[in-house]
């Protein structure tokens, strides 16, 4: 009986020592966040010099000419349309026609590209309880997917946007419905 008790006590001591050694090990190293973001400079499938009707490729948008037109999107989970104008403005509406008229637009604002090709869109005119001042602008890299040399889809890669609704809405691929 005494031997069994001694064996049990020794097992408890050994388990305690083993557990102590496991917990005493250093915590695994965590990866440092990347502080120097380098935006992509090329598409995943760069466009060839000679384009045929069957050519599928993508480019990083770096200027208004790359995205001008009307695109479909989901705005707060509802189908909508956004028009990017050549003058650096955008207009959001519930139809293609409503994106031509600021009076019937759901929202609008300016956009721009910086020297690195980063797209910044500003949501103007919204009440600060809807879009706080510090969240008016969102920064993205835009990928334009082309078929036969024509833009057909637009993807936003978020760099920084604290306006959750815009970031969520722009995670979906936008399809181009009109060149103007």
Image (spheres, rainbow, N blue to C red):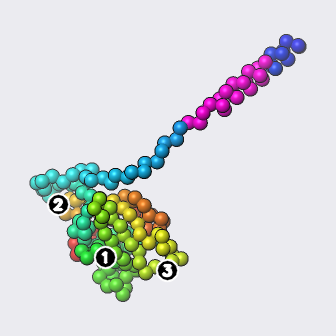
Looking at the rendering, which quadrant does residue 175 occupy?
bottom left
Front residue (pair 141, 98): 141
User: Where on the picture, by quarter, is residue 13?
Assistant: top right
The answer to whether residue 59 is left or right of residue 173 is: left
Is disc 1 surrounded by few (<14), some (14 to 19) or many (20+) residues within 10 Å?
Answer: some
* Label 3: which secondary element: loop
Which of label 2 and label 1 is nearer to you?
A: 1
Q: Which mark is residue 99?
A: none
Cα distance between the residues tagged 3 and 2: 40 Å
The answer to whether residue 136 of the structure is visible from this angle is yes
Q: Classify mark 2: helix, strand or loop.
A: loop
On residue 149, which mark appears?
2
For residue 20: magenta? yes
Residue that label 3 marks: 127
Q: Are marks 1 and 3 in contact (CB under 8 Å)?
A: no
**Residue in view at x 16 percent, y 55 percent:** 54
Q: Residue furthest left?
A: 50
Mark pair 1, 3: CA separation: 19 Å
**Which residue is at a point 46% across and 79% down the rendered structure image?**
126
Q: Is residue 56 left or right of residue 140?
A: left
Give the class, few, some or many, for how many residues have Cα within 10 Å of label 2's Cα (few <14, many ≥20). Answer: some
**Residue 93 at what x, y percent from top left?**
36, 78
Q: Determine which of the numbered discs, if any, sits on residue 89 in the image.
A: 1
In the displayed structure, 105 sits above or below 37; it is below
User: Does the image show residue 78?
Assistant: no
Residue 133 within the segment the image draws in magenta: no
Magenta-colored span: 10-28
């Amino acid at each position: 009986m005494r031997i069994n008790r001694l064996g049990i006590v020794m097992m408890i001591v050994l388990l305690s020592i083993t557990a102590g050694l496991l917990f005493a090990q250093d915590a695994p190293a965590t990866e440092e966040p990347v502080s120097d973001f380098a935006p992509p400079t090329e598409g995943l499938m760069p466009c060839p010099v000679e384009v045929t009707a069957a050519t599928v490729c993508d480019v990083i948008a770096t200027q208004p000419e790359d995205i001008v037109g009307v695109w479909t999107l989901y705005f707060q989970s509802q189908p909508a349309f956004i028009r990017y104008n050549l003058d650096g403005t955008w207009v959001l509406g519930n139809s293609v026609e409503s994106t031509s008229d600021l009076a019937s637009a759901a929202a609008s604002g300016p956009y721009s590209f910086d020297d690195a090709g980063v797209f910044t869109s500003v949501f103007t005119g919204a009440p600060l309880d809807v879009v706080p001042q510090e969240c008016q602008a969102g920064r993205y890299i835009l990928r334009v997917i082309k078929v036969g040399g024509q833009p057909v889809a637009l993807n936003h890669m978020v760099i920084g946007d604290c306006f959750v609704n815009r970031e969520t809405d722009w995670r979906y691929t936008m399809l181009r419905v009109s060149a103007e």
